[in-house]
Amino acid sequence: MKPLIGITGRLLTLGMMDKTSPRFRDRQISTYFADFAEGVARAGGIPVELPWSVEATEVVERLDGLVITGGQDVHPSRWGGQATVDPDVDPRWSHDAHDLGRDAYEAALIEAAIAAGIPLLGICRGHQLLNVVRGGTLIEHLEDDGPIIHSTGNAAPSAGDPGHVVEFVEGSWVHAIYGPRRQTNSWHHQAVDRPGEGLVVTGRTADGVVESIALEGLPVLGVQWHPEWSVEPDPAFDWLVEQSTQLAAGRARLAPQNA
């Protein structure tokens, strides 16, 4: 049985897209990068793109796994930071504006998934939100002139800059997935600072920036890079689907059998 893997997205306005008919420019659309679904499907799962219309715990009850995707910064009010984006910018009309609605829904999904023991993969913003939901903090902004550049701007998806290598903590289960190190891409200007409750740092770059976290005792992984945009398939999706398959199989064994 292939597991159902939920994937989060954004709520935007159709008028943001070029050549949209004027009749529909004010209608809202749920948007998702197809790369996430392709990564899940390639690993053997069934991707399910999640709108914000259904209560989070009800959604999680029907899923075998969950991906919290990347995007704009988590609102600093959630972790004690300083607002750097104009609060009057409408997130339905801007890719970069803080989105309190998205923060709230994805935070509820994270909490529900952890409570239910659902395998969870947080990617970039999702990795940071996972940390914030657990009570952790973020670094407001990484300097662009540091020893390792943590934002490649408009660079195309790639295997990552040769200098951007994540080294994984030996003995951690994340080390077992990736090995001692991996060259990764980088599209972030913030990073995990103080880990939240139960989270452990499992990977860093040479300058000490946290690139991977995991929740002790549960199948919960956060990565700062974008595995969906790696040139080579990233084992994070294989890990998620494998864990979710085990969960789905266990549920099937416990389900009542028809007489």
Image (cartoon, rainbow, N blue to C red):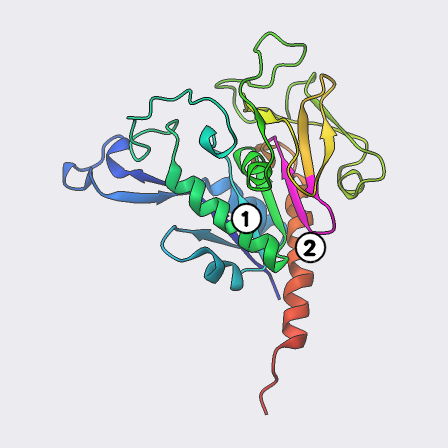
Is residue 33 visible from the viewing direction of this image?
A: yes
Q: Amino acid at mark 1?
A: Ile
> Dot 2: what SS?
helix
The picture quadrant where one finds residue 183 is top right
In the rendered image, residue 72, in percent from the top left (x then y), is placed at 44, 30
> Dot 1: what SS?
helix
In the rendered image, residue 76, in percent from the top left (x then y), is placed at 47, 28
- Please indicate whether residue 203 sits to the left or right of residue 67 in the image: right
Q: Residue at x 74, y 18 (%)?
A: 206
Distance from Cα at disc 1 to Cα at disc 2: 19 Å
Give the extent of the magenta segment: 214-225
Tell which tag, 1 or 2, sits nearer the viewer.
Answer: 1
Q: Residue at x 69, y 48 (%)?
A: 239
Q: Residue furthest bottom?
A: 259
Q: Residue furthest right?
A: 171
User: Where 5 falls versus 207 (above or below)?
Assistant: below
In the rendered image, residue 80, in percent from the top left (x then y), is placed at 51, 28
Residue at the disc numbered 1: 110
Q: Residue furthest front?
A: 80
Viewer-closest of 33 and 253? 253
Mark 2 is surrounded, within 10 Å at the Cα level, by few (under 14), some (14 to 19) or many (20 or more) other residues, namely some
The picture quadrant where one finds residue 171 is top right
Residue at the disc numbered 2: 242
